[in-house]
Image (cartoon, rainbow, N blue to C red):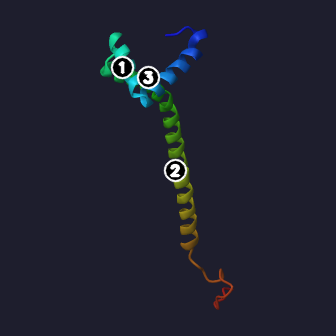
Amino acid sequence: MASPEFQDIAEIYTINNALDWQLDGAAALDIEARLRLYGFDQHAISMEVYVQARDILVLFDPLLNGAQLRRLMLLKESSSIRRSRMSRLSDIGGRTNRPGDNYLSTERSY
């Protein structure tokens, strides 16, 4: 790990090396030879990439869980509102008309 004052410079070199590795075949061979010299093979590189990606993905896990929880709460609230409306509609539709309740009724109760 680079010391903090050299991290920015190390990151620039790393980005440039990655671009060389992708775009320049001769540079790719040179980089891979140097990596093998220091004991890094494709498996070691793949594992390092996996570990770094896993560390980053761990940061997103709480965000994803929070978003899912908010969606569930909205669905529950929506369902509750829908049930409340259906209940009110059934109450309105289930009322029975008694004589005298309806002004159009011909029956009169005295």
User: Which residue corresponds to mark 2?
Assistant: 75
Q: Are marks 2 and 3 in contact (CB under 8 Å)?
A: no
Q: Look at 56% across and 76% down and name the residue there.
A: 96
**Depth check: 76 or 85 in front?**
76
Quarter-wise, where is residue 52 in the image?
top left
Classify mark 3: helix, strand or loop: helix
Q: Position of residue 1 (x, y in %)?
A: 49, 10
Number of the front mark, 1 or 2: 1
Q: Look at 58% across and 11% down and name the residue there.
A: 6
Q: Position of residue 2 (x, y in %)?
A: 52, 10
Q: Amino acid at mark 2?
A: Leu
Q: Look at 37% across and 15% down and name the residue there.
A: 35
Quarter-wise, where is residue 70 in the image?
top right
User: Which residue corresponds to mark 1?
Assistant: 32
Q: Amino acid at mark 3?
A: Gln
**Quadrant into which the C terminus falls:** bottom right
In the rendered image of this protein, does residue 51 appear above or below residue 92? above
Q: Look at 51% across and 23% down and name the residue there.
A: 16
- The tag earlier along the polypeptide, 3 or 1, is 1
* Disc 1 packing (10 Å; few <14; some 14–19; many ≥20): some
**Depth check: 38 or 61 in front?**
38
Label at residue 52? 3
- The tag earlier along the polypeptide, 1 or 2, is 1
On screen, residue 108 versus residue 32, left or right, reads right
